[in-house]
Every structure is written in structure tokens, then in C-alpha cells.
């Protein structure tokens, strides 16, 4: 068996670290070809020492020089580069078989789209790629023969619960709707009045999952689930009215698919991202992910609730952007990134996040998603507008 060469975009984040853990368990199957990080060069250096990638990419020239010197100091021959062009290069390199797209936010769009145009196997953990440029990206996957495998636990569960020929159309496969589960985040039972005083520390403490700060805040506001609705629409060609969010606090059922004959198929497992990562890496095979077996007796019960759109309006903002189409989801995503950053810097209250997003969507009309330039222009305009309105949101 020839080993697969894997590029990991976002190697030092939680998805990247878990991907390396799965690869570590299967050295006969996978070789780390390239790693990238934004600024965490201490972690990236240790990853380079262990996995000896051919390339490593960081944000800027200063960090690249520092990492290169450290690599040379221990005898590593890893080629250290920097910037967006280098990210694209490690995503499209002819020796690369699979690209783990795990850069958080809009920064992951360009290299992931390039990987699609190069016909790579893409393990998609960056939901913003489909949120911002769903039409462009899925068309590139089709036209260039790329393979797209979802890594979000919910979308992996849906993928596993659909028939293998679902790409021919969900109606033809007898699918009635997709049930996208949500944990509800850390504030699901918190009274609305108390949400006004939420701190970044509290928002970043998820009851079930260990995640980065940005995605943890998205989970707390339920914007993460809104982005996943948009992602599901593009992954599975499912209209928004047939995607139902279901709050499931235990995070054991990762999502479900309901069929017209009354059957509901689901994928269950412990809340551990190594399961969907291993599934995507080895598809269509199954490999050990290092995840503990699910103990149903210890769990004892599974609860389900309808989402509270009044207390968590971000979910409905995402549905509205999806229905508006064009660049509206890109505007939504950009405004959310600005809002979350401001909240984490204590310049915006928690309840100001949906207010800022709604105001940005109202201020900027949606245009056609004709090209990558159109998407990036909408993203830049939304960031400028949202940043200018932070002080007006209370």
C-alpha cells in the first residue's frame, strides 16, 4: 500500500492536532507532506520534529525565518515558507494526495479552492469555504474531479447516513429531510437577561467539545449551527426548508437523516473529532481513531429540543442569508468574524454579536457570487462596515 501524502492547513489548531494523532497511529498509511500554522511556531516546530514534513508554512517572513533557523538547528530539512501563495502551493503540490482544510475562518478559502481546482481529495473542516463560496467551490469540485469529504462531526454523520448515490439528488434517494444536531452550547439554559453579562471566558467553555476560541463563541451564539446549515445545503444539495436543527445536549447523535418511508438513520459516537477525521482520511475504509467505545449504559438518556430562535437569533440570520443567496452568506460570515473578534477583545457584548451581523446584512445588499473576486470583495466590504458599527452596538 502506497502511503498517502497529506497536507494539513491549520496544523496547530484542534482539528490539525487531532489529524496528526490519527496519522500517528497509521504511519504505514499516511505521510505528513506539509504543515501550516498562523503564528504558533512553537507547536509547529514540535510537529515538524516529529513528522518531518517536506514543507512548513507560516504567516509572515519573520516567523518563517525563526522557524527555519530552529529546524536547521536540529538537522531538519523542512522547507519553511510564508504567505498565501505558499499555502496555495502546498495545497496543489503534485505529490499531495489529501488536503485537510482546517484553517479557521475566511483565510482558508483560497488554498482550499485551489486544492479543489487541482483535483485533490479534500477533507473539509473549514465550513467558511462553503459558507462564503458554496457555488464556486462545489462547481470546482465537480469540474476538476476533486473528492470532497466533510469533517465537521455533523456533516460526517449525515454523509454516513445517506445512500452512496445521494449526489444524484436527495429526492430520488427517498430522503425527506436532514436533522442537524446542536449541543446548544454553554448557554442553552441560561436566562436571556444573564446573556448580557456573558464573558469571553464563559463563552469559550463548551460542555462537550474542546475547540478553539472563535468556534467556541460561534457555538455559544449558535452561529456555528447556522453556518453548518449553509454548509449542509451545499454539501448535500438540500434546500434550507428541509434542514432542521435539533438541539441534543449530550452530543452523542451527531446528526440524522429522515426518509420518506419513516426511517431515520443516525450516526452515534463519543464527542471526539478523531472519529470524523479518521473516517474522511480512510474513506471508504474504516481505521482505528483512538476513540473510546460508546457506552450507551453510561449515557442512559438522549434528549432533544427545538432551537430557541428568540434567544439565539444567529441561527435565523444564517437561514435568511442562505435564502437570500449570492454574497449574503459571505457578508454574514465576515460580519460574524468581526463581531466575535470584538467580543473576545471585550469591545462588544455577547448579545451584540447578532445585532452587528444583522446591521451589516441590512447595510450591504447581496450581489452575485460570480467569481472569487466577487466573494472576496463582499467579504472585505462587510468587514469594513461591521468594524465601523461596533461602537454603535450596545
Image (cartoon, rainbow, N blue to C red):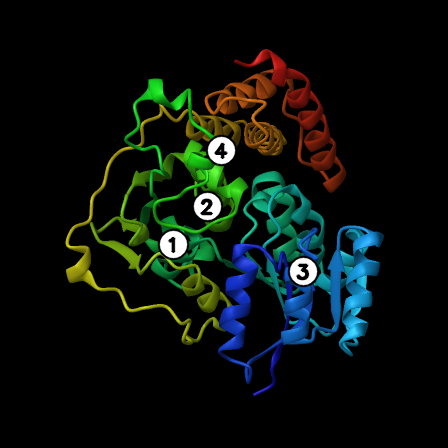
Above or below, 186 against 391 in this view is below
Q: Which mark is residue 158?
A: 1
Counting residues from the start of the chain, the first of labels 3 and 2 encountered is: 3
Q: Quadrant of residue 179?
A: top left
Counting residues from the start of the chain, the first of labels 1 and 2 encountered is: 1
Counting residues from the start of the chain, the first of labels 4 and 1 encountered is: 1
Tell me the SS state at disc 3.
helix
Image depth: mark 4 or mark 1 in front: 4
The answer to whether one can see residue 143 in this image is yes
- The image shows a total of numbered marks equal to 4
Q: CA distance from mark 4 to mark 3?
A: 25 Å
Q: Is residue 297 left or right of residue 384?
A: left
Q: Residue furthest front?
A: 73
**Residue denoted by label 3:** 42
Residue 283 in picture, x, y percent from top left = 47, 71
Q: CA distance from mark 1 to mark 2?
A: 9 Å
Q: CA distance from mark 1 to mark 3?
A: 36 Å
What residue is shown at x 25% (from left), y 48% (from top)?
A: 260
Above or below, 80 against 26 in this view is above
Q: Which mark is residue 232?
A: 2
Q: CA distance from mark 4 to mark 2?
A: 28 Å
Amino acid at each position: 500500500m502506497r502511503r498517502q501524502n497529506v497536507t494539513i492547513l491549520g496544523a496547530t489548531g484542534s482539528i490539525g492536532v487531532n489529524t496528526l494523532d490519527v496519522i500517528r497511529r497509521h504511519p504505514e498509511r499516511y505521510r505528513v507532506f506539509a504543515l501550516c500554522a498562523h503564528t504558533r511556531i512553537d507547536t509547529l516546530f514540535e510537529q515538524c520534529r516529529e513528522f518531518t514534513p517536506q514543507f512548513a508554512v507560516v504567516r509572515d517572513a519573520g516567523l518563517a525565518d525563526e522557524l527555519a533557523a530552529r529546524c536547521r538547528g536540529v538537522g531538519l530539512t523542512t522547507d519553511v515558507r510564508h504567505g498565501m501563495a505558499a499555502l496555495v502551493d502546498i495545497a496543489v503540490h503534485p505529490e499531495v494526495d489529501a488536503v485537510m482544510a482546517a484553517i479557521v475562518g475566511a483565510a482558508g478559502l483560497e488554498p482550499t479552492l485551489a486544492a479543489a481546482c487541482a483535483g485533490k481529495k479534500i477533507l473539509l473542516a473549514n465550513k467558511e469555504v462553503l459558507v462564503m463560496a458554496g457555488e464556486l467551490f462545489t462547481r470546482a469540485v465537480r469540474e476538476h474531479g476533486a473528492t470532497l469529504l466533510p469533517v465537521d462531526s455533523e456533516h460526517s454523520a449525515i454523509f454516513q447516513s445517506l445512500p452512496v448515490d445521494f449526489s444524484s439528488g436527495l429526492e430520488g434517494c427517498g430522503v425527506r429531510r436532514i436533522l442537524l444536531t446542536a449541543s446548544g452550547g454553554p448557554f442553552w439554559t441560561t436566562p436571556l437577561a444573564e446573556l448580557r453579562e456573558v464573558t469571553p471566558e464563559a463563552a469559550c467553555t463548551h460542555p462537550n467539545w474542546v475547540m478553539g476560541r472563535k468556534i467556541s463563541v460561534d457555538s455559544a451564539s449558535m452561529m456555528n449551527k447556522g453556518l453548518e446549515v449553509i454548509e449542509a445545503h451545499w454539501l448535500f444539495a438540500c434546500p434550507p426548508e428541509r434542514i432542521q436543527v435539533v438541539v441534543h445536549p449530550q452530543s452523542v447523535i451527531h446528526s440524522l437523516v429522515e426518509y420518506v418511508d419513516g426511517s431515520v438513520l443516525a450516526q452515534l459516537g463519543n464527542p471526539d473529532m478523531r472519529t470524523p477525521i479518521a473516517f474522511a482520511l480512510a474513506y471508504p475504509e474504516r481505521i482505528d481513531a483512538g476513540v473510546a467505545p460508546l457506552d450507551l449504559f453510561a449515557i442512559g438518556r438522549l434528549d432533544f429540543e427545538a432551537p430557541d430562535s428568540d434567544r439565539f437569533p444567529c441561527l435565523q440570520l444564517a437561514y435568511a442569508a442562505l435564502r437570500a443567496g449570492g454574497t449574503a452568506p459571505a457578508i454574514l460570515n465576515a460580519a460574524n468574524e468581526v463581531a466575535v473578534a470584538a467580543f473576545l477583545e471585550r469591545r462588544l457584548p455577547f448579545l451584540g454579536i447578532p445585532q452587528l451581523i444583522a446591521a451589516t446584512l441590512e447595510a450591504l445588499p447581496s450581489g452575485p457570487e460570480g467569481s472569487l473576486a466577487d466573494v472576496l470583495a463582499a467579504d472585505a466590504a462587510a468587514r469594513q462596515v461591521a468594524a465601523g458599527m461596533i461602537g454603535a452596538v450596545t
